[in-house]
Amino acid sequence: MTVSIDSQGTRLDVPNQLFIGGRWVDARSGETFTTMNPATGEVLADVASAGAEDVDRAVIAARAAFETGAWRTTTPSLRGRLIWRIGDLILEHAEELARLETLDNGKPLSVALAADIPLAADLFHYMAGWATKIEGNTISMSIPDATFHSYTLREPVGVVGQIIPWNFPLLMAAWKLGPALAAGNTVILKPAEQTPLSALRLGELIAEAGIPDGVVNIITGFGETAGAALASHPGVDKVAFTGSTEVGKSIVAAARGNLKRVSLELGGKSPNVIFNDADSSAAVAGASLAIFFNHGQACTAGSRLFVESKSFDSVVQGVADIAKNIKVGNGLDPDTEMGPLVSDEQLQRVTRYIAAGQDEGAEIVVGGSQRGDRGYFMEPTVFVNTNPQMTVVREEIFGPVLVVQPFEDLDDVAAMMNDSDYGLAAGIWTRDISKAHLLARKVRAGTVWINCYHAVDAALPFGGYRQSGWGREMGHEVLNAYTEVKSVCALL
Ligand code: NAP
Ligand code: MG
């Protein structure tokens, strides 16, 4: 069973099966669902629709692979080398994987090749190094008249369910799988229904890398069925989720039954701040990248732009000029800078938000409409004349829609930045580096970018304050999310 794709990137041969216990198997129900090309609205492929019975099978396979020790007792050195090999195989198949992402998700091929694929490979390469560096401590105790030898062991959590979204399909799979594997866990991964293809191909590469059977299981299916069954399964020790805050809350509820560990990477409404003393062309370009990268379908999208009053008009003009000139089109076209939104549903959702913004009295400077009559294209859109109560200012739109607001001084803008249920990221543009670091301390956000935006790295922890999530991914911080600490205390 192979996923292959012709040189035009249009004919696909993908497994319409589930990857369980190292084998490709049909869903028990025999059911499948279609995945679409959002640039054309046409069907790309049928994939298997996993149900609760298939989740059971995958949990049994993952449990067996965990308990036999096929993975966790493999030497850390070999574990690291096998994880490294996954990264190598991703690079060897970069072109093919990038095409799968473009076809299934809509993003420009140039972006998938420059960002998604190399970042996914780098994540595996970075995490491969951690396999040999997971350590405990020796601890001095203060109980009188006794001598103890006490130490901690860091052990894998066990069987981990991982549920990921459609905005960076392969990269999100890498963020989840890399650290779980480095720490010795076994995994059941469920990609998003809109974008299952690259995860299926990754399943084949994982087998080719030599990861033992059952260590990674990949099940395609719907959130309400396969995802919910995984989140509530009593045989799953931990669930790691990336997606909407609303579904994140249902994951927490589902995990309650066996008190499985939960880590969450959720939504955002991230503020981006431009001071008068910023390098104005870099700031304007950065503010545009912050919201329009990945068509605004990024949890860290800089969707609330705050501009110091004196610069307000020129920044709005600058961002609007960039927005007007972004080439929107099919991601396979080399000139395309912005592809379609991922689905008709997402296009309708963004369209509803734009209408709500207008109804509530906000003013559109540029964009605001769907593009073309085929595929799910949306114009880059900029709103001004907003107030802090408006829906477009408070809620995550997850599309190329920016709201711009003026501010007077640092305290003023710090309060505006923090006036949100979310706390994922923030951007600050200024030449006054002390001011930037002062504001970085005031903002409640998991990542603060100064004179840059969307700079992510396998070594840099990533995650949210408040309703943007629980826990951190990447960096060495992520190992806390995939290990348990055991204290061993011996009376000598
Ligand atoms: P979502 O519904 O939260 O989906 C994310 C993942 O969770 C998908 O794999 C989904 O499966 C699964 N899921 C859905 N309901 C579930 C349930 N009850 N139990 C277990 N798993 C479940 O996100 P979405 O529908 O793709 O997008 C909606 C909004 O979520 C976006 O507009 C945006 O606000 C936010 N979002 C955030 C991120 C992020 O990176 N933080 C990424 C994507 C979306 P299905 O594929 O079948 O739905
Ligand atoms: Mg698709």
Image (cartoon, rainbow, N blue to C red):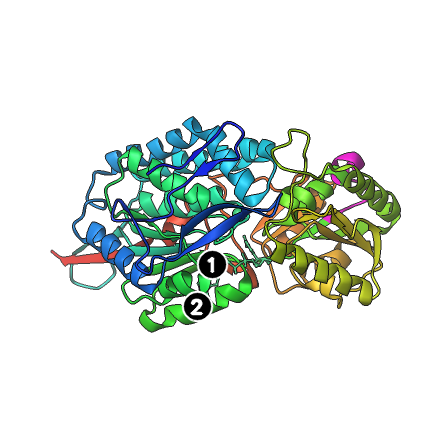
| Residue 121, quarter of picture | top left
The location of residue 300, given as percent across then percent down, is 60, 50
Residue assigned mark 1: 264
Q: Which x, y percent locates residue 165?
A: 50, 52
Note whether ligand 1 is within 8 Å of mark 2. no
Could you tell me how far apart the alpha carbons at marks 1 and 2 are, in whole angstroms? Answer: 9 Å
Three-letter code, disc 2: Val
| Left or right: residue 300 compared with residue 176 | right
Secondary structure category for the residue under label 2: helix
For the point 49% across and 68% down, which residue is it?
249
For this view, does 345 lie left or right of residue 101? right
Q: Is 278 included in the stretch rendered in magenta?
A: yes
SS assignment at label 1: strand
Q: Nearer the viewer, residue 12 or 289?
A: 12
Q: Is residue 320 visible?
A: yes
Q: Residue at x 87, y 43 (%)?
A: 314
Report which residue position mark 2 lands on. Answer: 252
State which quadrant residue 487 falls in. bottom left
Residue 408 versus residue 292 in the image, above or below: below
Q: Is the C-beta separation of discs 1 and 2 under 8 Å?
A: yes
**Tag 2 or tag 1, which sits nearer the N-term?**
2
**What residue is rendered at 74% in x and 41% in y?**
430
Residue count near mark 2 (Cα–Cα under 10 Å), binned few <14, some 14–19, many ≥20: many
Q: Magenta segment range?
A: 273-283
| Residue 44 image point, x, y percent | 51, 44
Specify the amino acid type for callout 1: Leu
Q: In which quadrant will I find the N terminus?
A: top left
Give whichever of 478, 374 is nearer the camera. 374
